[in-house]
Image (cartoon, rainbow, N blue to C red):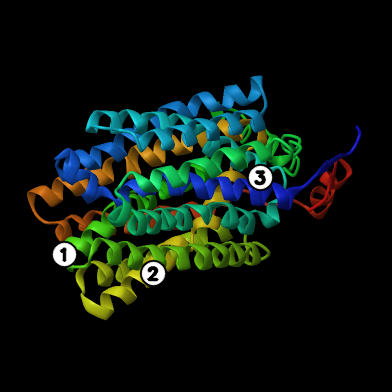
Amino acid sequence: MSSVRLYPRTALALLTALNLLNYIDRSVLFAVQDLVKAEFHRSDAAFGLVTSVFFIFYMCAAPFMGPLSVRFSRKWVIVAGALVWSLATLLTAVTTNFNQLLIRHTVVGIGEASFVILSPTFVADMFPVEKRGRVMGVFYLAIPVGTALGYLLGGVLGPKYGWRAPFYVGAAPGALLALLLLLIPEPPLGNFDTRESKTPQRDTIKSLIRNPAFLTATFGMAMMTFALGGLQVWMPTFLHRVHGYSLLDANLVFGLSTITNGLLASLVGGWISDRLLRRTKAAHYLVSAVSLGLGIPAACVALYASGKPMIVGIFAAEFLLLLNTGPLNAAVINSVGPHVRAAALAANIFVFHLLGDVPSPALIGYMSDRFSLRLAFVAPVVAIALSSSILFYGMKFAPPLPSARERAEPKSRAGVSS
């Protein structure tokens, strides 16, 4: 078989940049939520529903992306999805009523599903198992950093130029980066996976419901996503309403904390878990479980203190929650074989959104309307504790590590260049 020259670092950079824009486009609305609410005159529960609708269509579209990648190519499906969500982001700027905003979110959800399902499989086939904690830490740092940049973009432009302005700015770069990805060769499926990962116990659709490594990582991620999803949607509003911050200051405080921790914690968590992988196959689960467990008291300080202790609590809680970004995503990727990985990620996304950030924004909005926004944040704290417990239990199911011989084999199949 002729050698195929791959460009893993270039591919990782492009896909991470696209993922960054994905989350910027997704979170801009959170930053200008009160401005949109003032124009469309809807309740907190209704705006929580906007996010829930996005995730419903997003997770329902996800199962169709695996078959599409088999019929066409992962790269082309990823590019098509990025172009769709970029166009939908641009169209948001011309919405004139709440129903149009809902429709926009359904289109963005469908477009993003292809990217979020297939790009991690693309990245996984570029790097060996022992580097995936760090690599997934880099790729998924786009979640907190992109979300925070969305807060900052909306927080700076929204009050000055109107809530539509940030959507104009956020749309174009995604289309450009998607087209650049066409220049990168697509890696062979399962390029760095072991023989063990390609057995029927880990590499068939039926095996997913009997794979405890995959199931515990997925349900642990679901509870973590419930917490993060709710906090990301409502934290700027919480700072604005409960603590009297201006809309700009609320987005700056939470946005800067999220950017700093997104960069620092995502990279540190992946590095720690890859180092620990030399000692224990359960390293990815262990780092995630411990960081989430330590995040519980920090989250309580962030939500129920005030002044400087609250700011310190927000920073510490975000750092500890985001420390699991690389390890937990690497745990999901490594728990299944390459031929079922796209389907597994689709199932993973369906479950963790169904139980995570689909219900949490709407639930917090409902509790805010009925009681108070401060009391509503009890739900994310409980979810963090459940996530930590599930991942501690999942440690015993972590898949075996590749042998030295298996780690060397992919080099004969593909060339590697930066």
Q: Is residue 318 visible?
A: yes
Alpha-carbon neighbours of circle 2 within 10 Å: few (<14), some, or many (≥20)?
Answer: some
Q: Which badge, 3 or 1, is on the more N-terminal residue? A: 3
Counting from the top left corner in percent of width and height, residue 353 is at: 38, 40
Q: Is residue 382 visible?
A: no
Looking at this rendering, what residue extends furthest in the right direction? 2
**Vertical comparison of 191 with 275: above or below:** above
Disc 2 is placed on an element classified as helix
Mark 2 against mark 1, which lies toward the viewer? 1
Mark 3 against mark 2, which lies toward the viewer? 3
Which residue corresponds to the image point at 10% horizontal and 48% vertical from the top-left? 369
- At label 3, which amino acid type do we have? Val
Counting from the top left corner in percent of width and height, residue 131 is at: 68, 57
Q: Which mark identifies residue 242?
A: 1
**Vertical comparison of 111 with 228: above or below:** above
- At label 1, which amino acid type do we have? Val
Q: Quadrant of residue 376?
A: bottom left
Counting from the top left corner in percent of width and height, residue 181 is at: 67, 39
Q: Which mark identifies residue 294?
A: 2
Alpha-carbon neighbours of circle 1 within 10 Å: few (<14), some, or many (≥20)?
Answer: few
Which residue in the structure is indicated by mark 3?
123
| Numbered label tally | 3
**Vertical comparison of 401 with 336: above or below:** below
Which residue corresponds to the image point at 49% horizontal and 26% vertical from the top-left? 63
Looking at this rendering, what residue extends furthest in the front direction? 161
Q: Which badge, 3 or 2, is on the more N-terminal residue? A: 3
Counting from the top left corner in percent of width and height, residue 65 is at: 54, 27
**Are the residues at dot 2 and dot 1 in contact (C-beta closer than 8 Å)?**
no
